[in-house]
Amino acid sequence: MGAIDGFKLPDGWALFGQAFAAGFEPPPRVTVTEWADQFRRLPTKGASEPGAWRTDRVPFLAEIMDCMSAGHPSKRVVFIKSVQVGATECLNNVVGWFVDTQKAPLMVVQPTLDMAERWSKQRLASMIEDSPSLRGKIAPARSRDSGNTTLLKEWAGGVMVISGANSGASLRSMPASYVLLDEVDAYPEEIEGEGDPVKLAEARATTFPRRKILLISTPTIESLSRINKEWQASDQRRYHIACPHCGHPQHLIWANLRWPKDRPDLAAYQCAACDKPIPEHHKTDLLRAGRWIATHPERDVPGFHINGLYTPIGLGLTWAELASEWQDAHKDPAHLKTFVNLRLGEVVADPEEKLDADDLEARASAYPVRQIPVGCLAITVGIDVQKDRFAILMLGHGRQGAMWVLDWLELPADPTAPAGWQSLDDWLAEIPLNSRGLSMRPLMVAIDSGYLTDNVLAWTRERQRRGVIAVKGASTPGKPIINKPSKLDVTIRGRTIKHGAEGWIVGADTAKSYLFNRLAADGKKTATERTVHFAAGLDASFYAQLTAEIWDPNRRRWVKVRPRNESLDTWVYALAAAHHPAVRLHLWKEPQWARLEAALEPNTKDLFGMDEKPRDPIAPTTPIQPPARPPLPRRVGGFARR
Ligand SMILES: [Zn+2]
């Protein structure tokens, strides 16, 4: 588009400029680039180059912005990019142009409602304040003025709603002819009960014949990246510049940035055709003369890819700085992945520890559900509460962190009714038997209290002394698998009640990392060497849910790839129960295991009393007390039917 030779006024534009000076509005058919160059002012605070916006400083944005102009036929535009390439201003320009020239509804979606508010208060507010043509259209946000709040802006004939991809209600709030989706790779995979947030937002535009959808994002890991999937389906445009030596047109790729060993400060771009180095000071001119070329021109969705090598001089890292960062990143694989995502704007392969449901199912052992194999010496239970059921995982434990999934089920029940909880009590009252026919009661039962908290606490409160605890996943990462309890029962005066209900914070992401590292390590071992074991015949949904989340190294958190993940959650709770201060299986030393083993798995002679009596004084039929520290004799075991 027009940026190649610098911006030229189109026919009639000069007249229009005079008209604007006389107080007229810009005509609706002005393009986004024309509007931005004429009316957009960058804020004095925060912007590296305050003052009038100049598209020729970031020439590759012109065509992206103009695909969003009303006269352009594209209905869907995809922009996959690194950081520091002006994508935020690209979005802001589309918003400014829309407010100034269109009389229609617009929706801007940020990853969360919090981020939506921040974008509105910081980016949008300063754009309106600094651009005179917008200032007259939208008054500053006032809480008492319903037509103009942080998340809703009205102007004559138009309205803009600013939504969070984590809120189905905000995405459904209003039909919109334009839907601008910012940082789509940070959107949740699915909103509870409402499906894909991108589909939900897009559905708002279906009735508008002149609708447009813009998707912008820095990519993440391959299986999670929405923007990469969109880019793959697009016409895949890359910005080509001509070599100043030989004239060969090419797009900039990381592999062709070269520098002498340990001298990243000397980095230069090596032409793909003539091999001559192109110093970075040519970049400004090269970008201005550049153009987009599509890999699949037959496709009708324009998709644009830009990496950090294109960052205009003065607006971000130089080639030398990128080279230096790349060298540093090589010391840590996690940093390298971040570099590829954020600086090169490319997806990285999924983490190696990504687990496949079918692979895990193939590891199932021969022992049937609820039969305790030899070596499994302790049991904990994790429970998740759902609207119409309990998800329950029974987990066995042995030496050196060995784990056995003994049972997994979804027990249909109404957790708001006493009968529902009775069915849970009944399930727990069925004590499983071990290889010697001895009953083994769960040492500790952990139930999630994040949903129907009052009902859960009513149940745990009465069973606290019998080893039933309420747990809640920590919202901040890096917590220990189980943390200190907080007293949840308070008096009317706000004092905590001494023997009232306790809630234990579970470091769910820590527990998931622990579990997945073990499962991944098992993948390289033979069946007999593995430390995690699965009962035969567990439902396939168990394995699907167990692999419903993967670790995103950039956002540093676990991300759902499938909506249902209860088997993973319940495993986390059962693991937290094993780490509970009254149990602490992870800290047990060999003498403790040996003592428990002697009690639970006496050798055959002992069992039939043909030889000497068992050395351990615990009779086989009484519930086994773990030799835990500190010993809390009445706290554990005990799920007698009432
Ligand atoms: Zn060349």
Image (cartoon, grey):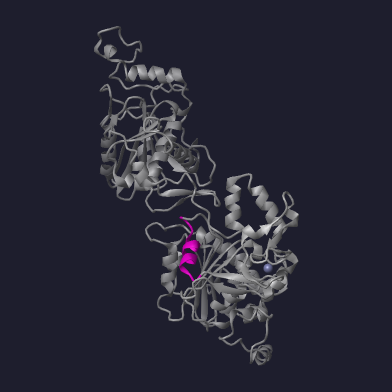
Q: Main secondary structure of the magenta part?
A: helix
- Between residues 75 and 267, which one lies in front from this camera angle? 267
Residue 317 placement (x, y as % from top left): 70, 59
Q: Where is the C terminus found, in terms of image quarters?
A: top left
- Taking the image as drawn, is residue 321 in sight? yes
- Taking the image as drawn, is residue 141 in sight? no
Residue 491 placement (x, y as % from top left): 46, 40
Ligand 1 lies in which image quarter? bottom right
Farthest top residue in view: 612
Q: How many marks?
A: 0
The residue depicted at 33 percent of the width and 20 percent of the height is 600
The residue depicted at 27 percent of the width and 11 percent of the height is 605
Stretch of the chain drawn in magenta: 223-235
Farthest front residue in view: 274
**Is 91 left or right of 226, judged from the image as shown?**
right
Q: Where is the N terminus found, in terms of image quarters?
A: bottom right
**Is 486 left or right of 459, judged from the image as shown?**
right
Find residue 10 and report its image quarter: bottom right
Residue 209 placement (x, y as % from top left): 43, 81
- Between residues 10 and 209, which one lies in front from this camera angle? 10
Residue 411 placement (x, y as % from top left): 28, 43
The answer to whether residue 336 is above or below residue 219 is above
- Between residues 191 and 139, which one lies in front from this camera angle? 191
Is residue 523 within the magenta segment?
no
Is residue 230 within the magenta segment?
yes
The residue depicted at 75 percent of the width and 66 percent of the height is 281
